[in-house]
Amino acid sequence: MLGEAGILPGDEVQQILDGLQQVEKELAAGKFPFREDDEDIHLNIERRLTELIGPVGGKLHTGRSRNDQVATDVRLWCRNQIDALREGIHTVVTALLDAAERELAAETVLPFYTHLQRAQPVLLAHHLLAHVEALGRDFDRLHDAAQRVNECPLGAGAGAGAGYPVRPERSAELLGFSQACRNSLDAVAARDFAAEILADLSLLMVHLSRLSEEFILWSSQEFGFLTLDDAVTTGSSIMPQKRNPDGAELVRGKVGRVLGHLQGLLTTMKALPLAYNKDLQEDKQALFDAVDTTQLALRVSAAMIQSARFDRGRMRAAIENRAGYANATELADYLAAKGMPFREAHTAVRQLVDEARAADKRLEELGLARLQQAAPVIEADVLDALTTAAALRKRAAPMGTSPSRVRAALAAARERWSTPPDA
Amino acid sequence: MLGEAGILPGDEVQQILDGLQQVEKELAAGKFPFREDDEDIHLNIERRLTELIGPVGGKLHTGRSRNDQVATDVRLWCRNQIDALREGIHTVVTALLDAAERELAAETVLPFYTHLQRAQPVLLAHHLLAHVEALGRDFDRLHDAAQRVNECPLGAGAGAGAGYPVRPERSAELLGFSQACRNSLDAVAARDFAAEILADLSLLMVHLSRLSEEFILWSSQEFGFLTLDDAVTTGSSIMPQKRNPDGAELVRGKVGRVLGHLQGLLTTMKALPLAYNKDLQEDKQALFDAVDTTQLALRVSAAMIQSARFDRGRMRAAIENRAGYANATELADYLAAKGMPFREAHTAVRQLVDEARAADKRLEELGLARLQQAAPVIEADVLDALTTAAALRKRAAPMGTSPSRVRAALAAARERWSTPPDA
Amino acid sequence: MLGEAGILPGDEVQQILDGLQQVEKELAAGKFPFREDDEDIHLNIERRLTELIGPVGGKLHTGRSRNDQVATDVRLWCRNQIDALREGIHTVVTALLDAAERELAAETVLPFYTHLQRAQPVLLAHHLLAHVEALGRDFDRLHDAAQRVNECPLGAGAGAGAGYPVRPERSAELLGFSQACRNSLDAVAARDFAAEILADLSLLMVHLSRLSEEFILWSSQEFGFLTLDDAVTTGSSIMPQKRNPDGAELVRGKVGRVLGHLQGLLTTMKALPLAYNKDLQEDKQALFDAVDTTQLALRVSAAMIQSARFDRGRMRAAIENRAGYANATELADYLAAKGMPFREAHTAVRQLVDEARAADKRLEELGLARLQQAAPVIEADVLDALTTAAALRKRAAPMGTSPSRVRAALAAARERWSTPPDA
Amino acid sequence: MLGEAGILPGDEVQQILDGLQQVEKELAAGKFPFREDDEDIHLNIERRLTELIGPVGGKLHTGRSRNDQVATDVRLWCRNQIDALREGIHTVVTALLDAAERELAAETVLPFYTHLQRAQPVLLAHHLLAHVEALGRDFDRLHDAAQRVNECPLGAGAGAGAGYPVRPERSAELLGFSQACRNSLDAVAARDFAAEILADLSLLMVHLSRLSEEFILWSSQEFGFLTLDDAVTTGSSIMPQKRNPDGAELVRGKVGRVLGHLQGLLTTMKALPLAYNKDLQEDKQALFDAVDTTQLALRVSAAMIQSARFDRGRMRAAIENRAGYANATELADYLAAKGMPFREAHTAVRQLVDEARAADKRLEELGLARLQQAAPVIEADVLDALTTAAALRKRAAPMGTSPSRVRAALAAARERWSTPPDA
């Protein structure tokens, strides 16, 4: 750019470019002679360049300041990390889709829960696809954040703009940015792009923590829905029977850390006058650790999902055994369909559930006679209506959990996620 | 929708619609008979509807659950609030652009600051445009958030999907959503859209706090750059001389509150298993208060900017008086342009600044002879190079603070912000 | 104080006191004529006083400023709230101790969990006493906070100290403070006492959330350890079988809110120069809502514990049924006691657990012969060692879960909590 | 303890102790052969001990579990760090007291500020002592936290208590704890002591940030109250005149980080069921980094204060020059003392200030005649009343800023801080 703009003569530009290629080789080979007292990477490179090509190396810095360079570096780093994070999400989603496909084929059912109480039957595939939706929004948020990251601060100088006829748009283009920043003071003072990424990662971690919480619950002896692979569990040095879901706990435990970094950076940015203040250097520690932590959580999540063995029998039993009464809504709906006002139907079923619970029976096991006594509109077809299969089939509208609908939803998700994240 | 899908017969639909219009009138007139024991707005309306049109009113609820209704309500509310918030940002930006235009015409200059130390001269218009850039990204972030808000959960039922052949896309369309949600469990369990809004508002408040901090600094006796209007200042009951920048402090002080709501909701969402949990109702308190607080901050900010009287003389003096040495960089650049290596030039100027500071003089007041003694390359044209006008003119590349460049930047910003926010 | 210090003559003091008693009566009777444009409570009272007793009412304000008055008011409020919060904790603890006593008498056992995996048998009373310990520290923290709250800012004036020979220690004494503040600037600028209370409440809420999480888990169909009272559960408008643990979810959900207030106030206080800034008024909203929220959580927690019915059979079954193997550690300890190195014993038991799990048997059901084959040191007494009673008895050292030890711990806790909180 | 309790025979105890002394030497000499696959420090030591003394080394672990050991280690570490942090605070306070003493001797005055507007004259020593008060509460809070840290979890085993007749009180005594924990489940599940420390450090950092903010303001060209030492400032690679207050910005910028750790750990702890969960290991990263960060901030703060050179002339000028009118309150008080109702006096002075401001004069420079015209009660002694010395003298009540009072306050503070922190 400095050459094209006529700020430096062509031969000096060539010398600098040759020198920088040498520097790049040294860096790639791990042989670059870093010096602590050169303060940062820019001064190291400038010093080394000058050693290699003489005083003209000092012209590398023409029209630049540490303020705009640092802002540029952080944005370049963020851009690459966003790509990598989206790859990581893509891997988790693929694992979820693969699992959903397997479990759809196996017709695996389980109750979904509200308030951690059994609610109604759903296909496990439907449940897994719910997580795909949430991760899809995280994926999109990072895409949106990338648009704001992708502006190049070079040319802002220390804050007032470079004192040379630089061409910021050309610098931006050469570095793969979509455009240059528009205001020099903002270019060196802004860190909202960093906080936005931390907010996106916080939500992503929250979503992963919800999945992890379910895996922890499901792998307890009480639920027994899931056996986790040895790779994501550990034993106990004392208790020989233990298979602790360490991977899932790690993901859940680390949410706090990422949330903390978000809060920390927002607090740091609060009430800073323009333009650059040293406080802003805190962005790096927060970003580095938050990205590392989230990438770890994505890898662990993917491994957990890929290797999870679902206990299909236990899941089905949670619908159909003598607790939970996940088909109670079906009975109320049945009554309503036969013309009983829904509030009345609700009350009648509630009483039947209480009675069945006291007798340790399923609703069906109360017998047709007893059911009819409670609600004379009941006919023999009620027994079919109370089956898990009927409950699923009935939810065939869009969003719902019927097998055909879930099959279509899975296909649509496969289609949506078929392109690689950086395309 | 229920009529179109054949779930309810046409006459019942008509009765319900007529009844709802009556309810709407009562609500508009403030005459709707709310009852506390009806728990929420849905049950109040259903009860009132039934009073008005009889038992068919109960069919309003067909295919719906409180879980999907509540999620729908919150999203509708968020959508409207986002529009209003973007209007609020637009008003602040317009105030900034108007001020920039006035101050550009007056050629108001001030030093920009890094580390709260005077750095180099900039146009005040340039400084104000920096804030416009930051607010522009907040404006865009809310736009992006609106895309994710704008999906309709109706049809999710309690979580497994409605037990009727509902048409969620049609419900979405009728309510002005861009589409229906895709998965019923996700539809009732997701609150990331709410947290995303809180994150966007946190960043917006951080940006407003940076502006407020500057207004507080600038209206101190030490800076004296700014006189705030009586409407945004208050006196003291004890100290008769006080004009406290209460408006700016209010904005700055309330950042914490919005950040707290963000953190609170993220914490609440952490590790909740699917689908709905009562914890999620905490979204409302956080959203309501964060939106109110941010709207207040936007209104106060707009009022402050609109009525601010900048002390152009004091601002210029901060560049040109015997402190700060905001033209020291110009001298170093001058030397470099004359062929002195920049590091040497930097050292020479640093010594001259020390000497001038000790003698309580401006750099120019050291005299040409002394300057030339320090650096023989100096010629008489140095005195022009050290003027504020020259320093500004030199920064004519894109992003920079030269008058022509700022004029162009202002025009471009006017163009960008000419369309109303909801267009 | 103003009279005793000779600042106001005795007759004026008497007039003011008489007038204030009248004001107090009006306030108590809800008849005080508040005026919005009097800004705050102090100006309302002074205006009303002047209406009642004439211009001498204006002397109420002598030697005071809004800055020291506001700080005094907030501290008085905090002091009272701390007492009330400690009462609230005391009530929850009493409920826990009562439950522990009942369950100790019933010898209720359950596995404790690490990583949500069954670990070893404990007495339910022991488990409940663990929560008492945590709440005891919250109780103590609030006591410590009260020491710092309990300093009186009156006499600081606007910040430099009163311009009259006031006696701050006497004001402090009359208002029941333990002492006066020592520095006028600090007296009006400090809000760490408020943030400290919010930190204490955050930890208290975290502790209540851990208890609530257990109650939510335990009242799931999968655990089935607990039936919550109707007063703290709700049904579903759709699903007739539901008994949602709303109370516990409310407590858990509201942690975020209190944490948010803590974070908000800390953020607000960050980097404020001395002395008073308007930002500090944000302390009140945060304190008021955090205290209300925590008091609500304490009341709900107490109600939940008082009315909880534990399913002793389900709890014991979680130790003794064919899953969990909560006595595996006992077997390893048994082997170690017989001289087998612990690491070898651990390995042997792990294999036996795997075998038993595959065969859906308890360890004991593998038969003595099989056990002896795995570890020849085993003798017939192993079957006793594997009982729940033996496992409990063995943990008779201080801190442990043996019945005698828990009995002593409960008695000691009763003793410690016997004095009322404000004693 | 194991020997005293008769759990291990004396000769084995002796072997273990001898071996551990050898291990200690190896650790001290940096020659301990750590192995990554030994997972943690406990397993490393046990393995090495066994290499040194044979199989009896395995008995080191008798009656212990990783759960209680880890909790013990963290508490030991916290106890030591609290001592070190209190030392750090003590050093900062001493620097403040030394500076206060110097500036008291020099009778340095400055206006104190409310709302960043000049309020009234105070002694700089008085201002510095305000910071001492705040830090004193941080010092006390850490003392209180130490009481809760100082309980020993050893004997809790994995959570149910050790399966041996251990003596937890003796372990506590040997390790210098004030007592043993009282409940085994709580002993392994509690981390509130860690979060409490983070809350205390957050407040400490907030207090340091308030001091730093003042140092940043004061070292701006606009205030000019302070010259910071080269050791805590840096220059700019571009702008030769810059002396950036990097040290103060570092302290201010790092508040966010510590607040983030607090928030992170609280979030992590939320809703974890008892007893140990892997999530809790997140306490260490948070504690380590928060303590390191705070120690750094304390060191930087002490260095800043110790080397600060206050510009006494500029500070006095901020009271006495033609802006700010820091003696306006004195004039109002003077009028009130002469019998004019305070509200009238306040209004009269406000008008005089406006007039003086417009004429760019000090109040005194309006002339006695003009003053008397505004308020006939004024006599010639008003000119003395308007001096800075008179304003200070008048605030001689406790808490106030009169020289004699500040001298006494300084002496009292010296006395209070004379004992070393660990005494």
Image: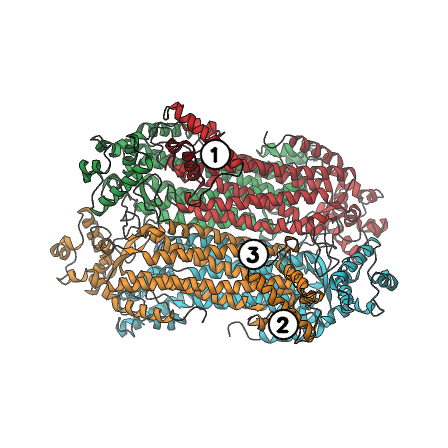
Chain colours: A red, B green, C cyan, D orange
Q: Earlier in the sequence, mark 3 or mark 2?
A: 2
Say whether residue C395 is visible.
Answer: yes
Q: Secondary structure at mark 2?
A: helix
**For the view shown, which residue lies furthest in the left direction?**
D369
- Residue that mark 2 sits on: D168
Q: For the residues marked 3 and 2, what is the alpha-carbon distance in whole angstroms?
A: 24 Å
Spot occupied by residue A200 in the image (x, y as percentages of width and height): 55, 41
Number of dots carrying numbers: 3
- Marks 3 and 1 sit apart, C-alpha to C-alpha, by 39 Å
Amino acid type indicated by mark 3? Lys
Determine the residue positioned at 50% across, 62% down.
D81
Chain of the residue under the numbered disc 3 shown in the image: D
The subunit letter for the residue under badge 1 reads: A
- Decide: is B342 above or below D120: above
Rate crowding at label 1 as few (under 14), some (14 to 19) or many (20 or more) other CA atoms within 10 Å: many
Pointer 3 and pointer 2 on the same chain: yes
| Residue at the extreme right of the image, as rendered | C369
State the residue position of label 3. D284
Q: In the image, residue D203 lies at what x, y percent?
A: 45, 58
Taking depth in this image into account, of C2 and B411 the one nearest to the observer is B411
What residue did someone put label 1 on? A23
Q: Which SS class for mark 3?
A: helix
Q: Amino acid at mark 1?
A: Val
The amino acid marked with disc number 2 is Pro
